[in-house]
Amino acid sequence: MHSALWVAKTGLSAMDKQLSTISNNLANVSTTAFKKDRAVFENLMYQTLRAPGGLSSQNTELPSGLQMGAGVRVTGTQKNFEVGDYNITDRQLDVAIQGGGFFQVVQPDGSIAYTRDGQFQLNSQGDLVDSSGLLLDPGITIDSDVVQINIAEDGVVSVLRAGQTDMEEVGALTIANFINPTGLHFMGSNLYGETTASGAPIVGVPGQDGLGYLSQGMLESSNVNSIEELVNMITTQRAYEMNSKVISAADGMLSFVNQQL
């Protein structure tokens, strides 16, 4: 069997995964705080027929070797945590992180997940929750007599109750960051999970120790550039076509040998 068939097959498989990555980016172009992915490639092992630097005679050595590559594979996907644009909503419970960091939410099993989606709401008990109903950590409760909510840049939450003129502090939001955010586990629903690759979370006050600060009445948009993704899609399509042509060429060579011999 012609080795070019198997090499081109790995190229088709890699481009297929690349296209899936691009399509996921485009599908989430309007998802709040979504971070785009990119596929990471590496070449496969080489078959060494002649090693570089080997002797070609008693007194001469080969300036280059004869090594045949086996193709390519996708080793992973990498998140790009570049900050997206910010949209002003003027909604009291919309909060954006200006800079690095993640909000913390409590999952049903009690573990902590992380998100940059600041579209917060109140549940039936007045607790501050994310769009999936998960409680924030640390928890913030807003009573029914509150008429105004203020979230400061450092995360302090203050409220104005009906009939009062002074703001009352009811809690504070903290955010977490990681040494290697790209090592987080992508869980869907705009949530990330801690892994050994990401390292332990570094929790602190917004605006301090390298953490981003909070902006009330704003939301971070997706960092997907649709034009860039469309260009990548065209490049991927052309690479897929070229690999398919290699298969056609190898098949033609094998067909010629079969007919002539």
Image: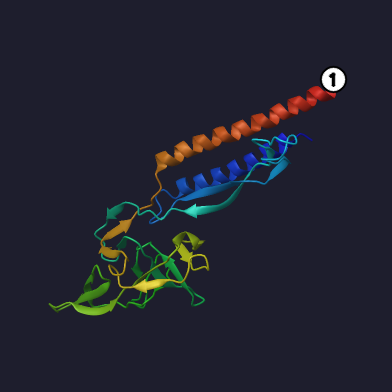
- Residue 117 image-quadrant placement: bottom left
Residue in front for this viewpoint, 207 or 237: 207
Q: Residue furthest left?
A: 165
Q: Is residue 26 left or right of residue 237?
A: left
Numbered-mark total = 1
Tell me which colouring the rendered structure shows: rainbow
User: Where is 6 relative to 124, above or below?
Assistant: above
Q: Residue furthest top?
A: 260
User: Where is 18 relative to 261, above or below?
Assistant: below
- Residue 103 image-quadrant placement: bottom left
**Residue drawn at the location 49% of the way across and 68% of the way down:** 194
Quadrant assignment for the N terminus? top right
Q: Is residue 190 visible?
A: no
User: What x and y, as percent, mark residue 137?
Assistant: 38, 75
Q: Residue furthest front?
A: 59
Q: Is residue 47 visible?
A: yes
CA neighbours of label 1 inside 10 A, class few (<14), some (14 to 19), many (20+): few
User: What x and y, as percent, mark residue 68?
Assistant: 69, 38
Q: Is residue 129 left or right of residue 247?
A: left
For mark 1, give the secondary structure.
helix
**Residue drawn at the location 28% of the way across and 65% of the way down:** 213
Quadrant assignment for the C terminus? top right
User: What x and y, as percent, mark residue 36?
Assistant: 44, 51
Residue in front for this viewpoint, 190 or 241: 241
- Residue type at the position of mark 1: Gln
User: What x and y, as percent, mark residue 222?
Assistant: 38, 52
Identify residue for label 1.
260
